[in-house]
């Protein structure tokens, strides 16, 4: 009896390892051990920043990859969360700042971002393709100019400064190593949630709506409600990224939610690939590395040109991004030899 139980336990563990995959396990171990070999600069400016923008790209991937809805308003949603942290918490701008504790301000900020995302989705889901892109771009642009010109709530072009990450459990969470692990933990949670959700009933329904909305509507599914709920979920991810972003920068201003930042999120998602949740994190790492070191290579005037050229090359070579390119190479690496006895 005990031998049978032990055999079943071993089989279950083996099945879990096969589902996770050796590559995912190695990647997870490498990310956890990364702070042991990285400096504070690489922990925050490369590691933490890539994870934050990877989460923003993930929120876009959820909409575009599974729902067929390309949004340029994800940085706007994150900005709403960031502004909510500045308004509900403490800041040095002497405007608003209600002094709420972080454990109360963060849920309200993420909720505000999720509701704003659902509202944007409700406005845009009745369109498709380029029209969805243009509507979300118009919303992002209007929000940027409204924040820049409004001083009662957004404090105009100056925004809010002096926003500090909390200290709890005796740890200052803006310190390099704790902040990296905080970003890694939230990114892993969002990644796992999207991966699990894509295989759930809602995820499969959303993908079916993406492929044939008319048929799903004829089968009795509420297409608009499913799409708006997807926007709500993406808003939760973008809202968490906005909280991390404002703690990272210590400030938020209209420049944080500008059109350039909105396009950067789209570039990140496309470079990494929109067919798997890991793609946006790969794209974020590539873009952050280029933004950090391209100035030293080509100068401050041309580093955006370099990023654009890399984007074009990846799109032309592999429309599915880095993951699509790896998908083409992997079968050749795994191909068995045809020689007899090999």
Image (tube, rainbow, N blue to C red):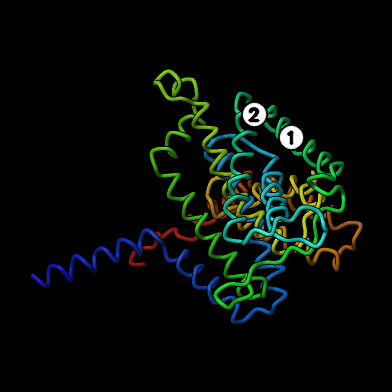
Q: What secondary structure is found at the residue carrying circle 2?
A: helix
Residue that lies at the very extreme toward the top in this rendered image: 218
Question: Residue 169: horizontal and vertical position, in percent?
Answer: 54, 75
Determine the image quadrant of residue 127. top right
Determine the image quadrant of residue 208. top left
Question: Residue 236: horizontal and vertical position, in percent?
Answer: 57, 47
Image quarter (top left, top right, bottom left or bottom right) of the C terminus = bottom left
Q: What secondary structure is found at the residue carrying circle 1?
A: helix
Q: Residue at x 7, y 69 (%)?
A: 1
Q: Residue at x 60, y 64 (%)?
A: 183
> Is 31 placed left or right of 73 in the picture?
left
Q: Residue at x 69, y 73 (%)?
A: 42
The reply to whether discs 2 and 1 touch (Cβ–Cβ < 8 Å) is yes
Q: What is the distance, in whole Å, between disc 2 and disc 1 at their CAs?
A: 10 Å
Seen in the picture, residue 298 relative to 223 is either above or below; the reply is: below
Badge 2: how crowded within 10 Å, few (<14), some, or many (20+)? many
Seen in the picture, residue 249 relative to 309 is either above or below; the reply is: below
Residue that lies at the very extreme toward the bottom in this rendered image: 36
Of label 2 and label 1, which has the lower sequence position? Answer: 2
The residue that label 1 is drawn on is: 139
Question: Residue 309: horizontal and vertical position, in percent?
Answer: 79, 51
Question: Residue 9: horizontal and vertical position, in percent?
Answer: 22, 67
Residue 124 got which mark? Answer: 2
State the residue in front, 240 or 1. 240
Residue that lies at the very extreme toward the left in this rendered image: 1
Q: Residue at x 50, y 29 (%)?
A: 225
Badge 1: how crowded within 10 Å, few (<14), some, or many (20+)? some
């Amino acid at each position: 009896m005990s031998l049978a139980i032990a055999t079943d336990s071993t089989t279950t563990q083996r099945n879990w390892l096969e589902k996770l995959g050796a590559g995912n396990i190695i990647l997870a171990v490498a990310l956890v051990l990364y702070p042991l070999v990285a400096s504070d600069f690489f922990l925050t400016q490369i590691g933490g920043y890539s994870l934050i923008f990877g989460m923003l790209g993930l929120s876009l991937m959820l909409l575009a990859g599974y729902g067929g809805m390309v949004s340029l308003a994800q940085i706007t949603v994150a900005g709403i969360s960031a502004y909510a942290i500045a308004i509900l918490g403490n800041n040095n701008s002497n405007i608003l700042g209600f002094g709420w504790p972080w454990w109360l301000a963060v849920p309200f900020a993420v909720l505000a971002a999720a509701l704003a995302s659902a509202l944007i989705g409700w406005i845009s889901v009745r369109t498709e393709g380029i029209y969805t892109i243009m509507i979300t771009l118009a919303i992002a642009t209007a929000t940027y100019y409204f924040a820049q010109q409004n001083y009662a709530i957004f404090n105009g072009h100056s925004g809010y400064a002096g926003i500090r990450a909390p200290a709890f459990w005796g740890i200052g969470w803006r310190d390099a190593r704790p902040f990296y692990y905080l970003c890694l933990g939230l990114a892993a949670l969002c990644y796992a949630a999207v991966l699990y959700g894509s295989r759930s009933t809602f995820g499969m329904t959303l993908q079916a709506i993406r492929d044939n909305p008319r048929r799903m509507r004829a089968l009795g599914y509420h297409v608009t409600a499913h799409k708006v709920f997807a926007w709500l979920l993406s808003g939760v991810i973008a809202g968490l990224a906005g909280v991390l972003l404002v703690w990272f920068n210590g400030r938020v201003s209209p420049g944080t939610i500008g059109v350039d930042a909105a396009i950067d999120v789209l570039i990140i998602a496309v470079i990494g690939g929109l067919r798997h949740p890991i793609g946006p994190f790969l794209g974020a790492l590539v873009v952050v590395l280029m933004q950090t070191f391209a100035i030293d290579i080509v100068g401050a005037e041309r580093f955006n040109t370099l990023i654009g050229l890399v984007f074009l090359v990846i799109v032309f070579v592999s429309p599915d991004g880095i993951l699509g390119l790896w998908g083409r190479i992997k079968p050749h690496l795994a191909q068995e030899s045809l020689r007899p006895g090999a």
